[in-house]
Image (spheres, helix red, strand yellow):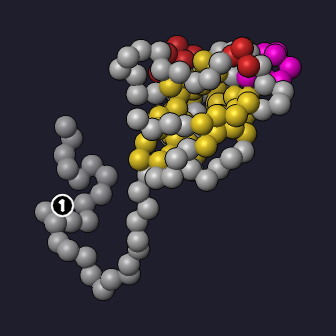
Amino acid sequence: MVTVRFLWDDDADRSVGLPRYESAGAAGADLRANFPDRGTVHLAAGERVLVPMGLRLAIPAGYEVQLRPRSGLALKHGITLPNSPGTIDSDYRGPLGVIVMNAGREGFAIEHGMRIAQMVVAPAVQASFDLVESLDETVRGAGGFGSTGAS
Protein backbone atom coordinates (compact mmCIF):
# COMPACT_ATOMS: atom_id res chain seq x y z
CA MET A 1 0.00 0.00 0.00
CA VAL A 2 1.19 3.50 -0.86
CA THR A 3 1.08 6.15 1.88
CA VAL A 4 0.39 9.81 1.09
CA ARG A 5 1.32 12.08 4.00
CA PHE A 6 -0.72 15.20 4.83
CA LEU A 7 -0.08 18.37 6.81
CA TRP A 8 -2.84 20.78 7.89
CA ASP A 9 -2.63 24.40 6.77
CA ASP A 10 -2.53 26.77 9.77
CA ASP A 11 -6.05 28.15 9.16
CA ALA A 12 -7.67 24.82 8.21
CA ASP A 13 -10.72 23.38 9.94
CA ARG A 14 -9.37 20.01 11.07
CA SER A 15 -12.84 18.67 11.80
CA VAL A 16 -13.36 18.42 8.01
CA GLY A 17 -11.02 15.43 8.10
CA LEU A 18 -8.52 13.95 5.68
CA PRO A 19 -9.50 12.61 2.25
CA ARG A 20 -11.13 9.21 2.54
CA TYR A 21 -12.50 6.39 0.44
CA GLU A 22 -16.27 6.21 0.83
CA SER A 23 -16.60 2.53 -0.13
CA ALA A 24 -14.41 -0.57 0.02
CA GLY A 25 -13.89 -0.62 -3.76
CA ALA A 26 -13.50 3.12 -4.35
CA ALA A 27 -10.57 4.16 -6.55
CA GLY A 28 -10.88 7.82 -5.56
CA ALA A 29 -10.76 9.37 -2.10
CA ASP A 30 -13.15 12.27 -1.60
CA LEU A 31 -11.76 15.75 -0.98
CA ARG A 32 -13.71 18.32 1.02
CA ALA A 33 -13.78 22.10 0.70
CA ASN A 34 -12.02 23.71 3.64
CA PHE A 35 -12.57 27.47 3.57
CA PRO A 36 -10.54 29.46 6.14
CA ASP A 37 -13.64 31.53 7.00
CA ARG A 38 -15.84 28.38 7.21
CA GLY A 39 -18.19 30.07 4.72
CA THR A 40 -19.88 29.23 1.44
CA VAL A 41 -18.74 30.14 -2.06
CA HIS A 42 -21.43 30.83 -4.65
CA LEU A 43 -20.41 29.78 -8.13
CA ALA A 44 -22.42 31.30 -10.99
CA ALA A 45 -23.04 29.34 -14.19
CA GLY A 46 -19.84 29.33 -16.25
CA GLU A 47 -17.70 30.55 -13.34
CA ARG A 48 -14.68 28.76 -11.84
CA VAL A 49 -12.90 29.05 -8.51
CA LEU A 50 -9.95 27.56 -6.67
CA VAL A 51 -11.33 25.67 -3.68
CA PRO A 52 -8.86 25.13 -0.81
CA MET A 53 -8.67 21.75 0.90
CA GLY A 54 -6.78 23.05 3.98
CA LEU A 55 -4.00 20.54 3.40
CA ARG A 56 -0.53 20.05 1.98
CA LEU A 57 0.63 16.62 0.90
CA ALA A 58 3.72 14.52 0.24
CA ILE A 59 3.27 11.95 -2.51
CA PRO A 60 5.89 9.18 -2.73
CA ALA A 61 8.39 9.37 -5.61
CA GLY A 62 7.14 7.41 -8.61
CA TYR A 63 3.48 8.37 -7.97
CA GLU A 64 1.12 11.23 -8.73
CA VAL A 65 -2.26 12.28 -7.42
CA GLN A 66 -4.96 12.83 -10.05
CA LEU A 67 -7.85 15.16 -9.22
CA ARG A 68 -11.19 14.25 -10.78
CA PRO A 69 -14.78 15.48 -10.62
CA ARG A 70 -17.39 13.70 -8.53
CA SER A 71 -19.87 12.10 -10.91
CA GLY A 72 -22.98 13.00 -8.89
CA LEU A 73 -22.11 16.71 -8.84
CA ALA A 74 -21.31 16.59 -12.56
CA LEU A 75 -24.60 14.91 -13.50
CA LYS A 76 -26.94 16.79 -11.16
CA HIS A 77 -25.37 20.27 -11.22
CA GLY A 78 -22.74 20.46 -13.99
CA ILE A 79 -19.94 20.84 -11.42
CA THR A 80 -16.65 19.71 -12.93
CA LEU A 81 -12.90 20.26 -12.87
CA PRO A 82 -11.83 22.07 -16.06
CA ASN A 83 -8.33 20.56 -16.05
CA SER A 84 -9.49 17.04 -15.24
CA PRO A 85 -7.66 15.00 -14.48
CA GLY A 86 -5.47 17.50 -12.69
CA THR A 87 -2.06 16.18 -11.73
CA ILE A 88 -0.18 16.80 -8.50
CA ASP A 89 3.48 15.83 -8.81
CA SER A 90 5.39 13.99 -6.10
CA ASP A 91 7.71 16.97 -5.50
CA TYR A 92 4.91 19.53 -4.88
CA ARG A 93 4.52 20.65 -1.26
CA GLY A 94 2.24 23.69 -1.56
CA PRO A 95 -1.41 24.06 -0.54
CA LEU A 96 -3.84 21.56 -2.02
CA GLY A 97 -6.54 23.31 -4.04
CA VAL A 98 -9.02 22.16 -6.65
CA ILE A 99 -10.13 24.24 -9.64
CA VAL A 100 -13.92 23.83 -9.72
CA MET A 101 -16.12 25.00 -12.60
CA ASN A 102 -19.87 25.34 -12.84
CA ALA A 103 -20.76 24.07 -16.33
CA GLY A 104 -24.43 23.97 -15.33
CA ARG A 105 -27.20 26.45 -16.09
CA GLU A 106 -27.79 27.61 -12.52
CA GLY A 107 -25.67 28.89 -9.67
CA PHE A 108 -24.20 26.43 -7.22
CA ALA A 109 -23.18 26.85 -3.58
CA ILE A 110 -19.98 25.18 -2.44
CA GLU A 111 -20.33 24.80 1.30
CA HIS A 112 -17.52 24.40 3.81
CA GLY A 113 -16.88 20.67 4.33
CA MET A 114 -18.67 19.64 1.11
CA ARG A 115 -17.21 16.73 -0.88
CA ILE A 116 -16.14 18.55 -4.03
CA ALA A 117 -13.69 16.30 -5.90
CA GLN A 118 -11.85 13.01 -5.65
CA MET A 119 -8.19 12.12 -5.71
CA VAL A 120 -6.69 9.00 -7.26
CA VAL A 121 -3.16 7.93 -6.39
CA ALA A 122 -1.48 6.46 -9.48
CA PRO A 123 1.97 5.33 -10.62
CA ALA A 124 3.80 7.93 -12.69
CA VAL A 125 6.49 6.78 -15.11
CA GLN A 126 9.05 9.20 -16.50
CA ALA A 127 10.16 8.33 -20.03
CA SER A 128 13.23 9.16 -22.03
CA PHE A 129 12.73 10.95 -25.35
CA ASP A 130 14.63 10.14 -28.54
CA LEU A 131 14.42 11.87 -31.90
CA VAL A 132 14.52 9.27 -34.72
CA GLU A 133 14.53 9.31 -38.55
CA SER A 134 11.37 7.14 -38.88
CA LEU A 135 8.76 5.30 -36.84
CA ASP A 136 7.74 1.65 -37.06
CA GLU A 137 4.69 0.85 -39.21
CA THR A 138 1.35 -0.22 -37.70
CA VAL A 139 -1.99 -1.29 -39.17
CA ARG A 140 -3.60 1.95 -38.00
CA GLY A 141 -0.77 4.13 -39.27
CA ALA A 142 -1.52 7.86 -39.20
CA GLY A 143 -5.31 7.41 -38.91
CA GLY A 144 -6.60 10.04 -36.49
CA PHE A 145 -9.89 10.83 -34.80
CA GLY A 146 -12.60 8.34 -35.79
CA SER A 147 -10.28 6.27 -37.96
CA THR A 148 -10.98 3.01 -36.15
CA GLY A 149 -14.73 3.06 -36.90
CA ALA A 150 -18.01 4.37 -35.56
CA SER A 151 -18.66 1.81 -32.87
* 131 displayed left or right of 75: left
Q: Position of residue 28 (x, y in %)?
A: 46, 27
Q: Secondary structure at mark 1?
A: loop
Report the residue that reaches farthest toward the bottom. 133
At horizontal 69% and vertical 38% (from top left) the residue drawn is 56
The magenta-colored residue range is 34-41
Residue 131 appears in the figure: yes
Up-down: is 46 above or below 128? above
Query: How many marks are shown on the rendered structure?
Result: 1
Rendered image quadrant of residue 132? bottom left
Q: Residues within 10 Å of mark 1 (few under 14, many from 20)?
A: few
Quadrant where the N terminus is found in the figure = top left
Name the magenta segment's main secondary structure. loop
At horizontal 86% and vertical 20% (from top left) the residue drawn is 37
* 112 displayed left or right of 125: right
**79 or 21: which is nearer to us?**
21
The residue beneath circle 1 is: 140
- In reply to whether residue 37 is colored magenta, the answer given is yes
Q: Position of residue 38 (x, y in %)?
A: 81, 16
- In reply to whether residue 63 is colored magenta, the answer given is no
Residue 74 appears in the figure: no
Q: Position of residue 145 (x, y in %)?
A: 31, 52
At horizontal 47% and vertical 15% (from top left) the residue drawn is 22
Up-down: is 149 above or below 3? below
Q: Position of residue 66 (x, y in %)?
A: 51, 40
* 22 displayed left or right of 144: right
Quadrant where the C terminus is found in the figure = top left
Report the residue that reaches farthest toward the left. 139
Up-down: is 48 above or below 91? above
Q: Amino acid at mark 1?
A: Arg
**72 or 18: which is nearer to us?**
18
At horizontal 38% and vertical 81% (from top left) the residue drawn is 131
